[in-house]
Image: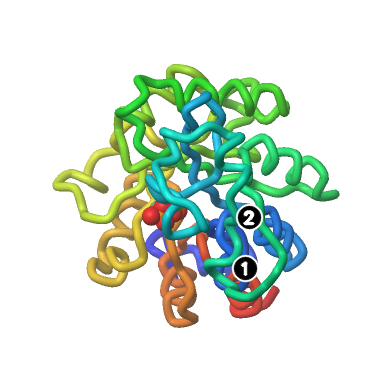
Amino acid sequence: PAPDGVSPDPSAVRVIAHRGSSAALPEHTAEAYRLAIEEGADGLECDVRLTADGQLVCVHDRTVRRTSDGRGAVSAMTLAQLAELDFGSWKSPGDPRRSAVLTLEGLLELVADAGRRVELAIETKHPTRYRGRTEAELVRLLDRFGLLPKGPERAADAQVRIMSFSELALHRIRRAAPAVPTVYLLERRLPLLGRTRALPGGAGIAGPGIELVRRDPGLVPALRRAGHRVHVWTVDDPADVDLCVELGVEALITNRPREVLARLGR
Ligand code: G3P
Ligand code: CA
């Protein structure tokens, strides 16, 4: 049984597609997110960055070098410049189809058109750089799409959560949109984590990486005893899926949603 004595139910674990179905298709593209929805993922994870003209785009790295045919920092390029690049050919060389940069707005439209409820786990990157502009634009867009919970009573089943490794970013989100659930991402165990009820940044959910969970088997039980919900990334290996189920993890973030859903019997 899990630390709270409740037997784990694999079918209750939420499966969130990390950068879309990104083992199969180029990460953070509309194609990868559509596939994740088709595969039955409960939700989609994405990283957002601000362009030079203030648009939020779904790109993980500081520069476009790894995932496109261009060069340069996302923050130094306008959306029009990014739109000229191909974000697909790095993954499938020789494939003549192009993949456009995906804006957060485009991702929200895709979710709105999914025909079923699809959760969103949005991570803000480089929060210290823009003095809150990233968070402000994120909250503005979520509001436009009706995705901001109206009060704390609705936060528990909110469709969207915002994640960050940065305490500062989490505080900003809480100030801008107090009812949106936030996830504190962590790669290392913090000294008091699990012994106190509060997570850094006032987050309601803890988001440890799977390496940390493997290395420190007491971590998830300690977090759960302290009353925290736990979402683990990036869980692709079947043995890690089983470990997370045993530990009572609420959500798994994975590059391989189809395989993880099958492992959970769904
Ligand atoms: O879901 C959290 C995880 O995505 C954090 O790491 O580097 O993949 O953004 P990274
Ligand atoms: Ca991420």
Q: Residue furthest left?
A: 191
Whether pointer 1 and pointer 2 mark residues with C-beta atoms closer than 8 Å, the reply is yes
Amino acid type shown at disc 2:
Thr
Direction from residue 212 to residue 243 in the image, left or right: right
Q: What is the number of callouts on the image?
A: 2
- The quadrant of the rendering that contains the N terminus is bottom left
Q: Is residue 14 visible?
A: no
**Residue under the image location 22 percent in, 55 percent down:** 188
Tell me if 163 is positioned left or right of 98 in this view: left
Give residue 54's position: percent from left, percent from top. Answer: 52, 24
Disc on res. 29: 2
Residue 20: image quadrant is bottom right
In front of the other: 253 or 214: 253
Question: To which quarter of the image does residue 240 belong?
Answer: bottom left
Can residue 187 be spotted in the picture?
yes
Estimate how packed mark 2 is, as few (under 14), some (14 to 19) or many (20 or more) residues with alpha carbons within 10 Å.
many
Q: Give the percent coordinates (x, y) of residue 36.
A: 68, 62
Is ligand 1 closer than 8 angstroms to the Cβ of mark 1? no
Place of residue 98 in the rendered image (x, y in percent of width and height, measured from the top left): 68, 59
Q: Left of 89 or right of it: where is 105? A: right
Q: Amino acid at mark 1?
A: Leu
Camera-nearest residue between 195 and 256: 256
**Residue 25 tag number:** 1
